[in-house]
Each structure stands twice: as structure tokens, then as C-alpha cells.
Amino acid sequence: MPSDLRFPPTHERKGFSTDATARRDGSPEPVVRELLQNSLDAAKEIAKATPNHPAEVVFTISECAWNLIPGGEAYRRAFHLATEHRRREQEDNLSPDENRVIRRVQSVLDGLSVRILYCRDNGIGISHMERVLFEGNSSKPREGGGSIGVGHMTAFAASDLRYVLYAGQSNPASVVAGGHAILAAHVSNNTLFSGDGYYTSEDDLMSYDPNNATRYHADLPPLLQGETALISDTGSVVCITGFNDFRGDENPVDAICRVAATNFVAAIQRGEFIIRVQSEDESKRVDSTTLGEILVQRATERRAQAQGWLAGRRAFRSWETLSEGYRLSVEGVNADEVEVWFRSLPDSSNDRTQVNIFRDGMWITFEAPGLNYSNFGGVRPFDCVVLLHRVNREGSLYQLVRSAEGPEHCGLENYRALERSERQDIQDQFSRIVARLREEAGESDSEEYTPPGFAIFQADLPRDAAIVPAYRPRMPEGQHPTPDPGPGPNPGPGPGPGPGPTPHPRPRPSPRPGTAAAVRRSFKPVLNTRGETESIAFAWEPQSTISSRLAVRLKVISGSDQTCEDPFIPQWLEVTGLDYNGIFYSAGEDNKEILLPAQQGTGLIHLAQAILDSSGVEPDIVLRSLR
């Protein structure tokens, strides 16, 4: 039977809102980085990604007519059925996120053509399409390279249609294809169909068993034939339909080059990785000869494009260290697994010491345990790059760091989840590197001395907390945060004929206090097209059985804590509600607190007003009784 986009029957009711796309929306960093990481890992599987056989990735931006989209009519039909079903089910009261998704899809359907972003590599290819399409989660095995499904799910953030196609060639005689669309559950002929559609044949779809590695093939559609024909030996193609240019003002070609150069400094500088980006108007190449030219354009950027990523200044300095520095030998550290590159900085330098960790040529973190700036008090400033290479030895620093990485391999989010012995192994191996770096850097001529592990504050900050202004988020032009009434005398009754209800009751400056809930959590701001934070994506999991509800609030830290003699009261942001596991919960009367069941979940918290600076926003989760 010919392949088509098919939505299997289901019992699960699912809306248009998905955390997988919302928390990465509007940013090229996670999308491009994950696509490149998967390609680099695939190249390493067949002994490529070396100076003699570099991994190659080609991004191509183009447009096509709607009739070339595989399963296009099935997609259009499912979208309209899903929209009607959700509006009936929610009584036309869809969440802002769902309405936003519907508008974006409809705008593509109404257009004359569809924008496409291809990503083609020369890696090991794809032999089992079901591994790509059905394992779209953020779990990460403790061995091997690459997260299962993370790159797959990340790509949807760049698609206004939320429809991504794939083709893979594991040998010249075998090509497989498939596709995945994320819409909402819908009803047809009194049957509920899934919001997840797959481009395949009907037999393959209905017989698929996630516990059985059956082959999952589809006909190679014309939209993928041109790119697949360019694969000379083995490789794969990712096709993002309805490409949204990452919703930013930055030229998408420049954005892809920037993310590639910033996050893969080591692999590119060493000649292991080549990236080409082309559109109908221009073509650019990122390799060891052009890397410096690209990075120097961001050499003064001290703040990353998005929270948790690498700023241009740090990336440029890492390139300088790899280009101009020298390699150190570290006693007790396997030289085949770990390379330590060092570059001294002048004592008068405005740049402070930094150590960046790269794994397989990809940047991971600048906040490794024991390798923070505070661990190098009393020594001359320097730059260091630590390169970790893949080895198959259990307990190696490579394996330990990889196990500590978060689902997006950016930072060591899972460090605390490791076994105590594993954390100790990481600290022991890093401590050897720290000792060698301190020895090589030498003692500073400055009289200042900072004990290792002690917090550092830059500049001459006044010690009197009373004159330090409380932190307030920057609001978009024309908007202002709700003023904090603060302490003050009770003004008493106003003029009038007698007692009665106050026409404008004074709002509570903060929500009701409560007992802190033991919850594992992660929060990330979601930006709109103007760069404002208008919602917060979250994921959390209660650490124990909780027989209460959770109350979720967002506060803006004041810049002081309870150790101050006169700490400032934090500001509480007003919220409209939150999408939680596909259900929308409205905020309470004061618009500062949302009640929801105490269960594991993901979703979006919607702010009443967008803010420009979300760096001081923190979640506050307390328990509320079931009454």
C-alpha cells in the first residue's frame, strides 16, 4: 500500500500544546545544536569525524509547493478535524499556547508555498526508522553517544507545521524514509485518532510494536529524493517542513553558522567537522579556516543568546586557546581520553579565568565541579579547554561526564542524580586537573586571595544592603511592573457617607505562605518573536507521595537574602494560568498562584505581562490542603 501520513486510533486525549516544542520555541540554539550533535555522533560511528575524514553537514533552506509535502492532504484533513474537536471539547476556551499553534499552522496552509529546512550528513545513516520516530523522549542512556529521541523532538520547534520527515541510507542499496507530525487528537467516524501521525504504509503503522525492532519503512517521497541522491555512501536527511526561520530577526543562515561555530569550536578547529549552509540567496561554510572569522563577530558578546548556552566571548576565547595555547600533561589522567589546553592571560586582563569542557568536540559546560572561577583564587588568570574523547572504559571521565549531562547535553544537570561514588570519581579526576592548572598558572601578584570554593563578586559593590535597589524585571516599552505597596501605615477609612465595600480593594503584595514541596523541577523561559518572556516552560516530579495540591507561583529575587539585616521583599509575577499535562488551570483571584494536582508533569506557565529580563525569575512551589 502506498505510504501516507496516518494517525492511528488511540484512547489518549491530547491537545495541540506540547512541552517538547514550547520550551525550545524561537531559538536556533537547541535545534541546530541537536541536529549537529546527532550528525557528528553518526559520523563517529563509522570512524569519520577525523582530520582525514571529517564529518560533513549541509543545511539547505528552500521552498516548495504544498502538493510536494508527503501526506499533505491527510495532514490538512487531520488538522481541521483536530481543531474542531478541541474547540468543542474545550467549549471554545483553548489555552493561549494551543491558539498560537493553530494560528501558525493555518498561516502555512494559507500560503502559496512552504518553507523547508534540510539537514544532510555523511554519517552512518538510518536502518531502523522506528527508533527515530517512536523514541521521541528525553531519556538518555548511560552509555553510547547521543540522546534517544532528543534531536528528533527538538526539530519540531523549528516547524510551524510541526511535521518533520527523515530519510536514511545505511548502505548504497538501502534507503528508508519516514515522517512524524504532532497535532492534536481528533474524531472521525466516531473513532478517536492520535495527535501523532506517521508517514508510512498502513501495514507498517498498524503492526508496529515498540518492543519489537521491526523495520519501519516508507516510500521515498519526491521532497526527499533530491537531498538523498546527494548522499554518496551513507548518511541521513532531516526535512523540517514549515520552517519558521527560528522566529527571530537574525538571518537564519547566519544563525545556523553562529550556533555551529559556538558549540562545536573544538571539532571544527581540529578539522573534524565541516558545516555548509545555503539558501536561494547565499552560501556559507564553517570549517577550520573560517571559524575564527565567524567567532570574532561575537567576541564581545558576554551574555549568551539564551539562558544556559555559550556566549560568543567564551567561544572566541576557547578558539584562541586551542589555536595559540599549548597542551598540558596531567599526572593520573589518561592522555588518550583527556586533553587539557592552557593559555595564560595578562594580570591586567579584564577577562577572568575560565575552563570550558568539550565532549567529542561539542561544548558541554563551563561550570564543572571544582573547575569554577572560584577554585582558582590566588593564581594568575588563564583560559583552559578540556577535551574529552570517547572511550569504552567503564568509569572513565568521558562516561561519567556524559552520564551527568542533562537531556540537551548542555550543562551537568544530572550531576546530583549520580551515585555518590561516581560524583567522587568526577571530583577526584577534576581535582588533578585543577592542581595542574594552578601549578602552571602560578601565583598572582595581586594581594587579593580568594579561598577555593569561596563566592566571588565582581566590582566594588556597596556593603550597605539598604542602598542596593531591589531587582525588578525589565518590561516591554509602555508596560510597568505592578508597584509593590511595601510597608506603611494604614491610611484608614476614606471620606464618604459611612462604611461600605471598598471600590478598589488593595491587592495582596504576595501570595499566602505555605510549606515548601519536595519537588524535582526545571524551568526555562519561552521567548516570543520580540525577545520577551511571555511564558515559562516547566517539568517537575514530586519526590514523595503528596496528599495535597501544589500551589505554583513565580517570584523575582530581590538581590538580598535572609542573611541580610534588612532583606527586600521579592516581587511576585502575575500569571493567567498554566497548561499542565494537556489541561489548562486558571490562576487564583490574585493572579499570583495556580493550584494543580501533585503529580509528575510538564507544561507552560503563562505570564499576565511579558517581561524582557527573566534572569531573576524563580519558581516557588508550596503545598495546599485538598479542602
Image (spheres, rainbow, N blue to C red):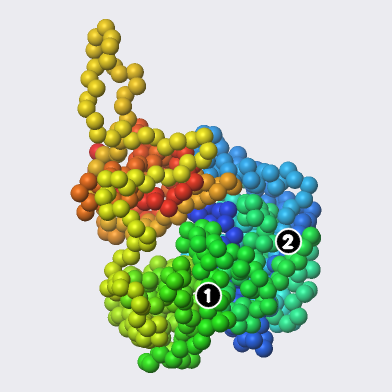
Above-or-below relation of 281 to 173: above
Q: Is residue 597 visible?
A: no
Viewer-side label of 1, 2: 1
Q: Nearer the viewer, residue 131 or 513?
A: 513
Residue under circle 2? Answer: 61
* Residue 122 picture location, percent across and down: 68, 78
The residue drawn where x is 48% and y is 81% is 343
In the rendered structure, which amino acid carries the disc numbered 2?
Answer: Ile
Q: Is residue 253 left or right of residue 549?
A: right
The residue drawn where x is 34% and y is 18% is 503
| C-beta proximity under 8 Å, tags 1 and 2 | no
In the rendered structure, which amino acid carries the disc numbered 1?
Answer: Ser
Task: Specify few, some or many for label 2: CA neighbours under 10 Å numbering under 14, 14-19, or 20 or more.
Answer: many
Q: Quadrant of residue 240?
A: bottom right
**Disc with the residue nearer the chain's start (1 vs 2):** 2
The residue drawn where x is 27% and y is 45% is 466
The Cα atoms of the two marked residues, 1 and 2, are separated by 30 Å
Q: Is residue 285 left or right of residue 585?
A: right
Residue under circle 1? Answer: 318
Q: Quadrant of residue 482?
A: top left
Query: Secondary structure under badge 1?
Result: helix
Q: Nearer the viewer, residue 87 or 380?
A: 380
Above-or-below relation of 238 to 73: below
Q: Quadrant of the C terminus?
A: top left
Q: Quadrant of the N terminus?
A: bottom right
